[in-house]
Image (cartoon, grey):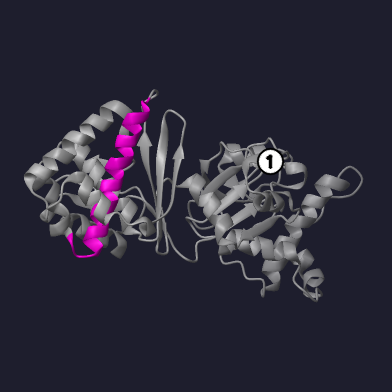
Amino acid sequence: MSKIDLNTRFISENHKVFVLHPGKRKRFYEDFAERNAVFLDIPGTQLPQNLDLENVRHRAAIYMGRHIGQWYRNSQSTKNKPSSQISAYLNKVAQQSTIPRYMSEAKALYRTAKPGDLVVVPGSGYMSRVFIGEFTDTFDPAHSVAARIYPADPIPARNVKWIHTRQIKAHFSDRLIKLMQNRQALIEISDIAEKKEIYDLCYKEYNLGDEAQGRIRVTKSHIDLRDMVDANDFVSYFVAMYSAKLRGELPEFMGLDWKAAAEEFYDRDLLTDTSYSINSPGWLKLRSSKFVLPAFVGVLLTLASSGATLDQAKQIEISNSSMVTNNECVLEISQTVRETLEMMNAGEWERICREMKELEKNVGLESTMTLKP
């Protein structure tokens, strides 16, 4: 039995996105990019895995790293290097009446940030590239990075996978640019609109709560306008099919010809946004308040492109490699596709497949989902 991989990121409500400044004057920008790691400016220290700011020794470890970093930057030629023993800082830290912001930032980076959370690293100018990465694992106290300016004093670090590095700072929204210009070392983005701006760059397909986004590729370099209209009509037909499924009227939908079915059942409220990339190659983006809809369209496009018979299409297994386990959303998508195909006759399916092959030839229409044997 073949499988379709949705390649869709399901984002939880507690997913976090941080802006991390790569040190004063962006001194760690190249270190971050080359080492696939991020860190704060606290060389020569070691942090526990479960950093607890109520623990004086843990706070002293952060203070020591910050103190050593300041010595490197300001006066290493005239003063003795600060102690590398955490115990030397315990009394100083114990006397603090409040917890400094830089310690809270350390906790956020080394403990709060979970695998899968995102980190945004800006460069120094408006035309510099912004690196967006995903934390790949929990903090490992044994993992450190020797930055260029502190070769003898490694810094505790978090591993990241850079998943978007092409966009320059000037092309972000004004609000995100302000966050990138803020001098605070680490900032958590809380506004959902700003988080979505980051998600749109990182994930072609994603679900966030009840909202979902999917993209359909248009891969031909040269496209006739009429062929693009046909592609839009084809995608609209699947949107109308999903609308009929929601209304419990698939038999009525299947009983109409193509244009009549799309005209009667297409529901504009199902798509909260539709946008195009006019590049060649480009894409069509669908955003819906129904999380099943973009995946439903993508799965049917993938099946129609595969040459599968209707019986084979009904037996397809749907999975999602972007998640460790398939959740209830994947099960609902599978059920919706299967129930729809059960209502379809072989003649209708063959017509859909022929149309898909024609659009592949004319505009390079294809799903971002993957068919696996």
Q: Name the residue rendered at 29%, 54% in the picture.
A: 266
Nearer to me, 8 or 80:
8
Of the pair 160 and 208, the residue shown nearer to us: 208
Provide the major secondary structure of the magenta segment: helix
With respect to residue 16, does 321 lie above or below?
Answer: above
* Quadrant containing the C terminus in the rendered view: top left
Closer to the camera in the image, 165 or 27? 165
Label 1 neighbour load within 10 Å: few <14, some 14-19, many 20+: many
Question: Farthest right residue?
Answer: 78
Is residue 92 located in the magenta-colored stretch of the structure?
no
Q: Position of residue 231 (x, y in %)?
A: 31, 37
The kind of secondary structure element at disc 1 is loop
Q: Residue at x 87, y 50 (%)?
A: 80
Which residue is located at x 17 percent, y 44 percent?
2
Q: Is residue 239 magenta?
A: yes
Regarding residue 108, the answer to whether it shows in the image is yes
Quarter holding residue 61:
bottom right
Residue 237 located left or right of residue 225: left
Q: Position of residue 209 (x, y in %)?
A: 42, 64
- Horizontal relation, residue 107 to residue 294: left or right: right
From the image, tell me which residue sits under label 1: 123
The answer to whether any part of residue 366 appears in the image is no
- Residue farthest to the top? 222
Q: Where's residue 81, x and y in %?
A: 83, 50
On screen, residue 73 versus residue 99, left or right, reads right
Q: Residue at x 58, y 46 (%)?
A: 37
Which span of residues is magenta-colored? 223-249
Residue type at mark 1 is Gly
